[in-house]
Image: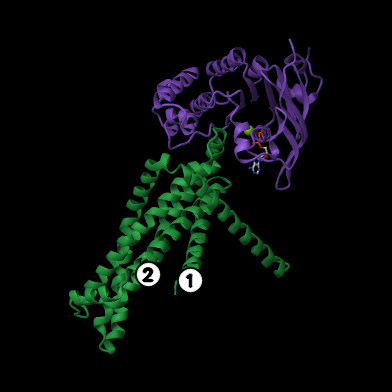
Chain colours: A purple, B green
Amino acid sequence: MAVNAIEIDIQKLSKSFRNFQVLKDLDLQIRASETTVIMGGSGTGKSVLLKHMIGLISPDSGKIFVRGVDITTQKGPALDTIRSRFAMVFQSAALLNSLTVAENVGLGLKEQHRFSKKEINEIVIEKLKLVKMEHKYNSLPGELSGGMKKRVGIARALAMSPEVVLYDEPTAGLDPIMAGNIDELILELKQKFKMTAVVVTHDMQSAFYIGDHICMLYQGKIIEEGSPESIRHSSNDYVIQFITRHKSVQT
Amino acid sequence: MANPIAYIGIKALTLFQLTGELLQLFASTIYWSKHTFRNVDKIFHFMVKMGVNTLPIATFTSLFVGMVMVLQTGYTLEKFGMAESLGAIVPIAMARELGPVLTALLLAGRIGAAITAEIGTMTVSEEVDALKTLGINPVRYLAMPRFLACLCMLPVLVIYADVIGILGGASVAATYFHIPTKIYFDRMAESLQFIDIIKGLTKAAVFGATIAIVGCRYGLEAKGGAAGVGEATTRSVVCSFITIYILNYFITRLWL
Ligand SMILES: Nc1ncnc2c1ncn2[C@@H]1O[C@H](COP(=O)(O)OP(=O)(O)O)[C@@H](O)[C@H]1O
Ligand SMILES: [Mg+2]
């Protein structure tokens, strides 16, 4: 297989909140049309890293190149243009609580003023079907469970026809069957549309199933990265503990 | 604080920064107002909501302020046998000063706080971030419609408050000081000029804009969950009050 182009190139990224340094000179490359999985303990900065990639957080230092353009120096309409190729699925789903499920999914398209109501509605139903949420079309987010909100969040991201999707724990809070469906969906989007995905997850099964490239975030840096096979046979103690839940393993 | 001068310095810097932020948000809201036409229904929706929420308290406030104004002024005027001039004084005070300022303070407490609470909740629950990732500018989507609604609605409320206040005054003038209502209104017609009303309404529009911008600014900058939103709401109201007082003083001076 030919090596894919680099979609996102993160160089020496550092970020602190107050006195707490979350990311320390982190380097990471995300390849186009691949699924990159980011693993790491709770509170290690996975969400913070993901938000840097779409310009929601500005770094203290370091650069983030998206297709060669440093997004840390961009703002306003220029940043909007770069962002328009991206979509993000938030850890908290971040649905607008005052809008229905359908309005949430169609919001981005509606605000572009390029499509008719009917066209938007068709896209909304199509995307809701992908995540099996079409029956909640008219519900308000407050009436949904956490996992359901997450699925609507995925539909909302996909409605924008992005080239790159950043998923923040997409399967957390889902039952195993629904989690499996989301995994299949992410795989299918890659195969059919060559979509690039960055997936933050704690779900090992999911990570090894969908990941082309797996990274481990620990103490502000990527301490190990490689193919699922190489991660599975990693000799790093932390990685071993993370994927097996135990300190040592017999092989 | 170890060093009072450093403390004052830091406070002054924060104040400058806040002023800068408010002006910047104001400019960007004005810029996004080019999309007014597409958002007419949303703006109208906010205006109705603001009107309905503020009307009862605005009625009470202006009615009683109009009445007590006549009591206080009439008491003095009567000593000089000039109680008939009540109609020349109270309506002008109402139209120029009390109507705009009192209604603005009510709107700041009622609507400015609601704007901060609403947008602040969206900010801390990542909804504002989600908007950005959907290519939706939060200033355009959240601030602009509220800004235009406040800007248009406050003058409307002030006209209403003026009328209620003047009527309240007339009723006390008639019942307490036995000034025939016709005389009260004749005096008013002689002294109250159209320009007084226009000036009052201009003030109202400025205050309306202030309330929305301050409300949105504190909402968009809210941090730290529900407690943070509560904190932001209180600060927003205090900031609106102070800004209204200051602007009112300078606008009045400008026009004297
Ligand atoms: N906006 C913020 N302000 C202050 N601290 C933050 C903020 N966002 C994240 N943090 C801190 O950064 C660390 C990493 O957070 P996060 O990226 O959400 O972790 P996770 O890996 O679980 O997604 C946490 O300690 C968190 O408290
Ligand atoms: Mg997280």
- Say whether residue B175 is visible: no
Instruction: Return the x and y of residue A221 as percentages of the image width and height.
Output: 77, 32
Instruction: Return the x and y of residue A133 as percentages of the image width and height.
Output: 45, 21
Q: Amino acid at mark 1?
A: Leu
Work out whether mark 1 precedes mark 2 in sequence or the reverse, and give the earlier one. 2
- Vertical order, A165 against A57 (above or below): above
Q: Is mark 2 within 8 Å of ligand 1?
A: no
Residue most toward the bottom?
B80
Q: Quick one: quadrant of the C terminus of chain A?
A: top right
Question: Between marks 1 and 2, how big is the CA–CA gap?
Answer: 13 Å
> In the image shown, does B18 or B23 lie closer to the viewer?
B23
Instruction: Return the x and y of residue B177 as percentages of the image width and height.
Output: 22, 80
Residue at 28 percent of width and 89 percent of height: B79
Q: Is residue A188 left or right of residue A100?
A: right
Chain letter of the residue carrying label 2? B
Question: Mark 1 sits on what residue?
Answer: B254
Question: Mark 2 sits on what residue?
Answer: B96
Q: Quadrant of residue B7?
A: bottom right
- Give the structural element (helix, strand or loop) at label 2: helix
